[in-house]
Image (spheres, helix red, strand yellow):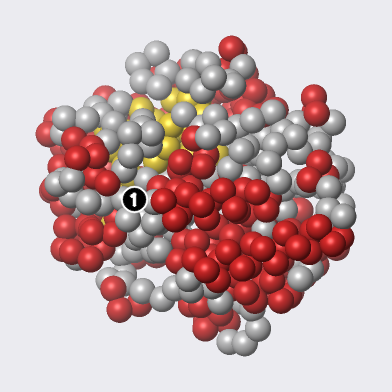
């Protein structure tokens, strides 16, 4: 329990989601400074973790006490993807002594997950028999709890509830419910169905913890979600990616929607400082500077909408020195323009939501910046929910510059 948590939330889990190229060690440590009390690793591809030494080394220091992560990075759950129960078991066995639990990804909606037979598509294989068998096998042979992060089934809430109960019967020790199905993504995102999550809590909440995921943008949302769902905690993904201090009393009604926590430049600087101490390609993340670039884009998204030179600097960042220069550029611009941290609001998080959430909440004046976002939206890879490509030139080259290009190591599963 973090000392600054309100008493009413002291027993609730405030969870940072497993996110590819995002849930790296320095980022996790940054969120833990601001009330997050449970973190997940990025999704780890079980087959690649076993068969590609370079991939394994960057994600985890197998054999080293703690796997290379410091004591302050606990509790920690390692998430894996895959569809072969034996491969998943062997991969999870390699780090079970260094984590507090393992998780199976049944939430990824991207096309690459369909090709790899994991994520939200795994829930639908063999009418759910495959994932139930996987959970039963893992829970019987591992020494740590096995949890599952799921979405709603496209066929509806009732079918989803039946599957979730089967997962608990098979040995799942915790369920994280994303209240959307695999079609609810990007401009079809929509609100998370907290009512459906409430039904999960009523069905199995007396047996295992249930974590609610979706539509969490500030602590007011956290409180509303817990009240409406009865869940044991909430998980944030996109909103906390943009603002790692989301689990604090900032940008909420009681503060007049003002940002009372650190500004976005300070967030970016704190992250870079942690990266120097804990390089992101060691102990929990395998993408190094690709990960740093993606984080800077999200932290500084609002600034990048209007300052092309800074946007280009972030896109072309290949070293920590270049990353620091990009942050310094934003800091200088803000100082020159008389920037007020109190007026900061989420920007990257609402990039799709403006199209389906009428008027949003009337608190933000960034609609002019969103026009720039829409111009480049079509440049992004269809499997990138982050839509973080902002540079001129060929779209594929732009995406490769910002996110990296691991095509040589892509076996169609990851």
Question: Circle 1: is it few (<14), some (14-19), or many (20+) Cα within 10 Å?
Answer: many
Q: Position of residue 193 (x, y in %)?
A: 60, 35
Q: Nearer the viewer, residue 357 or 196?
A: 357
Res 307 seen here: yes
Q: Nearer the viewer, residue 108 or 41?
A: 41
Q: Nearer the viewer, residue 20 or 307?
A: 307
Residue at the location (42% across, 18% down)? 205
Q: Nearer the viewer, residue 332 or 247?
A: 332
Locate residue 339 relative to residue 317 in the image: left or right.
right
Residue at the location (32% across, 55% down)? 282
Q: Quadrant of residue 5?
A: top right
Locate residue 66 relative to residue 11 in the image: left or right.
left
Res 107 seen here: no
Q: Position of residue 100 (x, y in %)?
A: 29, 31
Locate residue 350 relative to residue 142 in the image: left or right.
right
Q: Position of residue 185 (x, y in %)?
A: 57, 54
- Which residue is under mark 1? 284
Locate residue 302 relative to residue 59 in the image: left or right.
right
Q: Is residue 194 above or below residue 269?
A: above
SS of the residue at dot 1? loop
């Amino acid at each position: 329990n973090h000392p600054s948590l309100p008493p009413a939330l002291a027993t609730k889990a405030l969870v940072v989601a497993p996110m590819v190229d995002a849930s790296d060690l320095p980022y996790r440590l940054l969120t833990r400074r601001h009330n997050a009390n449970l973190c997940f690793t990025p999704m780890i591809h079980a087959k690649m973790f076993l068969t590609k030494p370079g991939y394994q080394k960057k994600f985890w220091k197998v054999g080293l006490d703690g796997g290379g992560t410091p004591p302050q990075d606990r509790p920690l759950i390692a998430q894996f993807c895959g569809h072969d129960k034996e491969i998943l078991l062997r991969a999870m066995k390699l780090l079970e002594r260094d984590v507090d639990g393992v998780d199976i990804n049944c939430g990824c909606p991207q096309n690459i997950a369909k090709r790899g037979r994991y994520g939200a598509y795994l829930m639908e294989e063999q009418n759910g028999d495959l994932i139930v068998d996987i959970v039963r096998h893992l829970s019987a042979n591992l020494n740590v709890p096995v949890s599952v992060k799921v979405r709603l089934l496209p066929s509806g809430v009732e079918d989803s509830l039946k599957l979730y109960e089967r997962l608990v019967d098979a040995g799942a020790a915790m369920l994280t419910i994303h209240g959307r199905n695999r079609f609810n993504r990007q401009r079809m995102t929509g609100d998370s169905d907290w009512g459906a999550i409430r039904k999960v809590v009523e069905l199995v909440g007396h047996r295992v913890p249930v974590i609610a995921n979706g539509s969490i943008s500030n602590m007011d949302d956290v409180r509303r979600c817990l009240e409406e769902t009865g869940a044991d905690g909430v998980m944030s993904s996109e909103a906390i990616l943009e603002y790692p201090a989301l689990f604090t009393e900032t940008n909420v009604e009681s503060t007049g929607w003002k940002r009372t926590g650190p500004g976005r430049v300070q967030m970016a600087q704190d992250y870079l400082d942690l990266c120097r101490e804990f390089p992101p390609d060691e102990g929990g993340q395998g993408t190094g500077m690709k990960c740093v670039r993606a984080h800077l884009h999200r932290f500084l998204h609002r600034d990048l909408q209007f300052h092309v030179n800074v946007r280009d600097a972030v896109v072309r960042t290949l070293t920590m020195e270049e990353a620091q220069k990009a942050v310094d550029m934003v800091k200088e611009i803000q100082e020159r323009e008389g920037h007020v941290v109190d007026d900061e609001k989420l920007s990257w998080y609402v990039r799709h939501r403006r199209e389906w959430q009428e008027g949003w909440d009337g608190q933000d004046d960034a609609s002019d910046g969103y026009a720039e976002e829409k111009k480049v939206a079509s440049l992004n890879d269809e499997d990138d929910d982050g839509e973080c490509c902002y540079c001129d030139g060929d779209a594929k080259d732009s995406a490769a510059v910002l996110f990296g290009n691991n095509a040589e190591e892509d076996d169609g599963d990851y």
